[in-house]
Image (cartoon, rainbow, N blue to C red):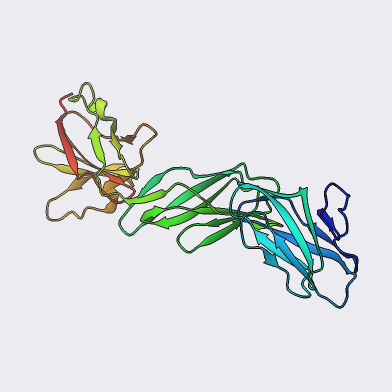
Amino acid sequence: MLTLALGAGTVAGAGLLGPPAWAAGDLTGTYTLDSTGIWTGQQVTLTENELVDGTPDSVAERTVDWGDGSPVQALPAGATKATHKYAAVGSYPVTVKLTDADGEGTATITNASATVQVSTAIGSYKFAVASNWTWADGGATAKLLLSGVPATATRVWVDWGDGKTSLLGPKTAATTHYYPVGVHAAKITLENAQGRTTPVTTRGYTVKVDETRPTSTLTVPGKPTRASSWKTIQGTAKDGQIGMDSVGVQLWKWTATKDYYFNFSTRKWVRYTPGKTKIPNAAVTWRGVDAKGVWRVPVPGLGKGYSLEVDYVAVDRAGNDSGWKYKVQKLTS
């Protein structure tokens, strides 16, 4: 709290009044600023604590110069408070002027300690990633990171730029928001007793449609004609955009007279008769990939004299697929 005391003259130093401007009667006032340190976009409030007019037949005119080049503000009759927002960083001396309506004298105060210091609100606000991929008509969940929020902030407002707003506590380190396809930016506004700050705009967050197919390969063992080399069938799959979902695998084996498909549910080979056997969903297994993009499928029941066929396809999280591929290998040992 800062108190500005003024009387019939100009204050030349702390607690020292200048010579009276008139003898007809004293015109004095005491004014208080609720803060002298704020952030851009916030406001200060000037309160009139006392006004003594020794010339009751006239009306004291009261004006405030906020020091930032804005028009001088006159206090309406009966008003005891005035507020003002500061838009730019700087140092602004606040001056209160009292003028007797009959024009016989004035009282003005200008004091270095009555200077409002305006600074930019601190803090770092950014999205965890600059962009993300989705499917057609989809969206993505953006993660906003907040750090360095000043301890004097009591609220943090996030305007997501799509008509939605979130209210956070000052200690919130991260929050999320779902965006549709497009380029988006969030505006962060701090708040305390002096009001809300000028918003800080983050860098853009882009949600793009992934229309690119993933890639997939089958790893052929060093001795491909040996049945035991195929006990675990594996390969790799990768996607350069939204990321991999899974790899579908279907297995067949046959001799000159008999065909079989592998049932992944029962873990057994099932005889297949063209035109009669209905292929179940269990004839295909879907496997995820590890951190290196490798997928694996263990397969029992392979032996010499069969031809093995491995069918495989990679699918990304947007639903794009690599297209089915296959490998046929004759097992001779």
Furthest residue in direction top, as rendered? 222
Task: Look at 54% across and 61% down and name the residue there.
Answer: 165
- Seen as rendered, the residue at the extreme bottom is 57
Tell me where residue 166 appears, x and y as whole percent. Answer: 56, 59
Q: Position of residue 176 (x, y in %)?
A: 51, 52
The C terminus sits in image quarter: top left
Foreground of the two, 263 or 201? 201
Up-down relation of residue 8 to residue 237 (above or below): below
Q: Is residue 321 left or right of residue 41?
A: left
User: In this picture, is 263 found above or below 57?
Assistant: above
Nearer to us in this view, 239 or 50 = 50
- The quadrant holding residue 287 is top left
Nearer to the camera, 10 or 189: 10
Nearer the observer, 204 or 74: 74
Residue 2 rendering spot, x and y as whole percentages: 81, 53
Who's the residue at 75% across and 53% down the image?
A: 35
Q: For the point 35% across and 57% down, which residue is it?
A: 138
Residue 83 falls in image quadrant: bottom right
Instruction: Please tell me whether residue 216 is drawn above or below residue 48 in the rendered image.
Output: above
Residue 101 in view here = yes
Up the image or down, 154 lies above or below 238; here it is below
Question: Is residue 250 found left or right of 191 in the rendered image?
Answer: left
Count of numbered circles on the image: 0
For residue 306, say whether it is visible: no
**Would residue 129 appear left or right of 82 to someone viewing this image?**
left
Q: Position of residue 37 (x, y in %)?
A: 71, 49
